[in-house]
Amino acid sequence: MTDALELAYWIVAGLLALFYLYGGGVKVVKSRDALRPMMAWVDSTPMPAVRAIGVIEVLGAIGLILPPLTGIAPWLALAAAVGFVILQIGATAVHLKLGDRRIALNITLLLTAAATAWLATTWL
């Protein structure tokens, strides 16, 4: 991997990981009432599913950073990035199904995850 691609990976993956550590963490620990102002979709989703999504997001964030950092199973970074692409496709679909057209963040996260996946292929 070239130094420029490696730097790009760490910047993009680091920002994506920070976002999902926060977003996933709040889904794991906050109540439905506390989440509602940030995430209206929680009203139509069972809380165990919201918690599971949060855990998946936190684990995915860890997967973006630890494997390439340690050199142990670095392919997991690619799997995590692809998982986030799939997650955002589903999230966008849920927003649109609920009549919420504010999907700019979802599209941004999808594109960022796709870029991270592409950059992660340089670790393989």
Image (cartoon, rainbow, N blue to C red):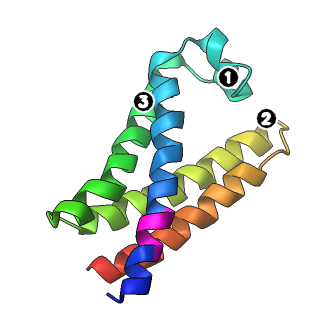
**How much space separates mark 3 and mark 1, taking CA atoms?**
15 Å
Query: 52 or 19: which is nearer to us?
Result: 19
Q: Secondary structure at mark 3?
A: helix
Q: Judge from the rendering whether residue 18 lies leftward or rightward of residue 70; answer left or right.
A: right
**How much space separates mark 2 and mark 1, taking CA atoms?**
9 Å
Q: Amino acid at mark 2?
A: Leu
Which residue is identified by label 3? 52
Q: Which comes before the other along the chain, label 3 or label 1?
A: 1
Residue stretch in magenta:
8-12
> What residue is rendered at 31% in x and 53% in y?
63
- Magenta region includes residue 120: no
User: Is the residue marked by circle 3 packed among few (<14), some (14-19), or many (20+) residues within 10 Å?
Assistant: some
**Position of 62 relative to 86 (above/below):** above
Residue 21 on image: x %, y %:
45, 39
Which residue is identified by label 2? 98
> What residue is rendered at 24% in x and 62% in y?
69
User: Is the residue marked by circle 1 packed among few (<14), some (14-19), or many (20+) residues within 10 Å?
Assistant: few
Q: Residue furthest left?
A: 72
Query: 91 or 10: which is nearer to us?
Result: 10
Where on the picture, by quarter, is residue 99?
A: top right
Which residue is identified by label 1? 44
Q: Main secondary structure of the magenta part?
A: helix
Q: Amino acid at mark 3?
A: Ala
**How much space separates mark 2 and mark 3, taking CA atoms?**
20 Å
Q: Which comes before the other along the chain, label 2 or label 1?
A: 1
CB atoms of marks 2 and 3 within 8 Å = no
Q: Which comes before the other along the chain, label 2 or label 3?
A: 3
User: Is the residue marked by circle 2 packed among few (<14), some (14-19), or many (20+) residues within 10 Å?
Assistant: few
